[in-house]
Image: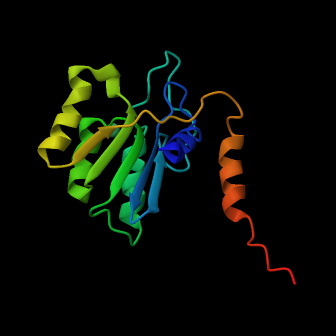
């Protein structure tokens, strides 16, 4: 779940940064964060702070990326920082996702926000809220590079 929160920080959206990862057999097979289509300006909101309709949800981005890869989302798990909307939940069900973990409620747990969770459960998908969140205090953008560096660290050769 912490990894999903790290990816959320890459989002250029100001209103809400959402991150999502798709995991299968303990491997991350896709990632996504909310944002504009590739090649567009990284502006997600108009002057009034309203999110533009062409902004992709983090889950939709992760699912689309998966569709372009050779991986299958069948029996995979999704970790998303915010509970999915109904449209993303519908895609998850078709993808064969079996578990959805989230931290924050979508639309503050209103009926519209709950709709997707009810839908997922009805589709036989396990839904669970995890409180694990990534500390929101700085260092913001450094968090990801730290993770990347940690992964890229070369394996130390045996010393004789
Ligand atoms: Zn959505």
- Say if 87 sits above or below 105 in the image: below
Q: Residue at x 29, y 35 (%)?
A: 85
- What residue lies at 28% left-to-right and 50% top-to-bottom? 99
Residue at the image position 55 percent from the left and 33 percent from the top: 43
- Horizontally, residue 42 falls left or right of residue 158, namely left
Q: Measured from the top left, where is residue 47 in percent x and y?
A: 53, 18
Which one is nearer the viewer's eye here, 33 or 140?
140
Residue 106 in the image, given as x and y percentages of width and height: 33, 28
- Counting from the top left corner in percent of width and height, residue 30 is at 45, 58
Ligand 1 quadrant in view:
top left
Q: Quadrant of residue 89?
A: top left
Query: Residue 69, relative to residue 20: is it above or below?
Result: below
**Residue 50 higher or lower than 56, as above or below:** above
Residue placed furthest toward the top: 48
- Image vertical order of residue 105 relative to residue 84, above or below: above
Quadrant containing the C terminus is bottom right
């Amino acid at each position: 779940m912490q990894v999903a929160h790290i990816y959320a920080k890459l989002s250029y959206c100001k209103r809400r940064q959402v991150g999502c990862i798709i995991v299968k057999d303990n491997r991350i097979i896709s990632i996504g964060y909310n944002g504009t289509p590739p090649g567009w300006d990284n502006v997600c909101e108009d002057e009034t702070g309203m999110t533009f309709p062409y902004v992709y949800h983090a889950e939709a981005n992760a699912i689309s990326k998966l569709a372009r890869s050779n991986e299958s989302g069948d029996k995979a798990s999704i970790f998303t920082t915010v509970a999915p909307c109904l449209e993303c939940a519908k895609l998850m069900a078709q993808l064969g996702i079996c578990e959805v973990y989230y931290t924050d409620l979508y639309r503050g747990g209103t009926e519209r926000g709950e709709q997707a969770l009810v839908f997922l459960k009805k589709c036989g998908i396990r839904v669970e809220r995890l409180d694990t969140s990534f500390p929101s205090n700085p260092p913001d953008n450094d968090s990801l590079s730290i993770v990347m560096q940690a992964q890229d660290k070369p394996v130390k050769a045996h010393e004789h």
